[in-house]
Amino acid sequence: MERSLRAARVATFVYFVLDGTLMGMWLVQIPAVEKRVGISNATLGSLLVLLGLGAFLGMQVAGRLADRFGTRLVVPASAVLCGASLVLPGLAREPWALAGALLVFGFGNGCLDVSMNAHAVHVEKAYNRPVMSAFHATFSVGGVIAALVGARAAGAGMSPAAILGASGAVGIVVALLAARSLLATVPASPGPVAGPGATALEGMGEPAAKRRTAPRRIWILAALALMCMLCEGVANDWSALEAKNILGAPAATASFAYGTYAAAMTIGRLLADRVSRRFGSAAVLRYGAAAGAVGLTVVAFSPWIWTALVGWAVFGLGLSGCVPQLFSAAGHTDPAAAGANVSRVAGLGYLGMLAGPALIGWMTRLMGLNHTFLLPALLLVVAAVAAGILRTGAQRESEPEPEPETEPAQCP
């Protein structure tokens, strides 16, 4: 049992790396695809909305399928769909074709995102200790792999279709090989579940009225995910531009703004599970969001690039553990609907990530770019104040105690 659980954990890492790699391969090919299709930046921006729409729809579908048929079936199927559809943007030669390709690829990516997170919840439950943040850290590793491989392939003269097609094919093979190590989860019954590590909400004899309070809690978690992921989107799209346009940093130096944030985010997620195990997930969200707000405020008022870089590092480190805690809490609230609950939280959070950069762009008409960062900083303050939601309902670590890694709980 212990060996199979560790194999399932490794397989989950593989899918997170795979998801990051497949998405990253598309991102590094965007300039080449834009040139091939012959569209403007504005048109591309409009088409990318379809990628987000497809991902949102995929999240809602895959969450329910995972609950009905089990993640062992849905995760590899989603990965195969994501890998197979990756080549479509590279084949597009007309805007309408690219629009359809992005919608399909976004759908596959959304399916994989939610189903692998739902499986990660099952793995975390079996370990009976926090492991979710480390999975999210390896998604970033996939992005690094994509950047290196994509640059090498482009340097060799490969076309976008060849690069994306080959990457998708490798992804399909990896997905199928890793599938056999996933946990053999079975669709959960709608009623409460008892077992090792079961929470009060999961225990036997829980009143039906109390169980019905879960959806409200899920939507609160989803709102917090929207706030946190909106802040991630702001950092992704505006960090380097703020350093260049507001602080006057050279382009090479300005790129360190995003790089510093991303590195701190990855390091923080590698450490967040240990912090959550020691202090509880509510503390990770509360103090992480507060630290993120401080870091972003430093960026907003910094007149020097180096203090801004410190601000981005604090921001990334603080924000790093927030979203994984929210996903984990959503999945553990009701094991019978883990996939659907994760899809709600991830879906609304994803919309926040898409809306954040656009909102900041609109606000720049009224104030300086650096001062617009005070809005996401304020949202993080709200998230820090509301972190107590993780101590209510189905929170499994209200009194966190270290668990020996060599004695995992029984697999679901």
Image: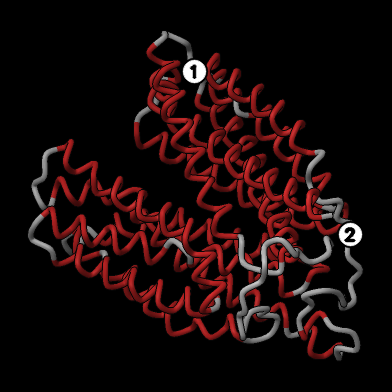
Which residue is the site of mark 1?
A: 160
| Viewer-nearest residue: 282 or 347 | 282
Which residue is the site of mark 2?
A: 187
- Which numbered disc flags the more N-terminal residue, 1 or 2? 1
Which element type, helix, strand or loop, lies under badge 2?
A: loop
Q: How crowded is mark 1: few (under 14 residues within 10 Å), some or many (20 or more)?
A: many
| Viewer-nearest residue: 225 or 152 | 152
Residue at left offset 81%, top offset 79%: 202
| Snapshot colouring | secondary structure
Give amino acid for label 1. Answer: Pro
| Viewer-nearest residue: 11 or 153 | 11
Q: How far apart are marks 1 and 2 (CA)?
A: 40 Å
What is the x, y in percent for residue 299? 20, 62
Residue at left offset 51%, top offset 72%: 224
**What quarter of the picture does the C terminus occupy?**
bottom right
Q: In which quarter of the image is residue 169?
A: top right
Q: In which quarter of the image is residue 34?
A: top left
Q: Nearer the viewer, mark 1 or mark 2?
A: 2
Q: In this view, does 61 lie to the left or right of 133?
A: right
Please say if 221 is above or below 351.
below
Please say if 282 is above or below 126.
below
Q: Is residue 396 left or right of residue 198?
A: left
What is the x, y in percent for residue 16? 60, 45
Which element type, helix, strand or loop, lies under badge 1?
A: helix
Give amino acid for label 2. Answer: Pro
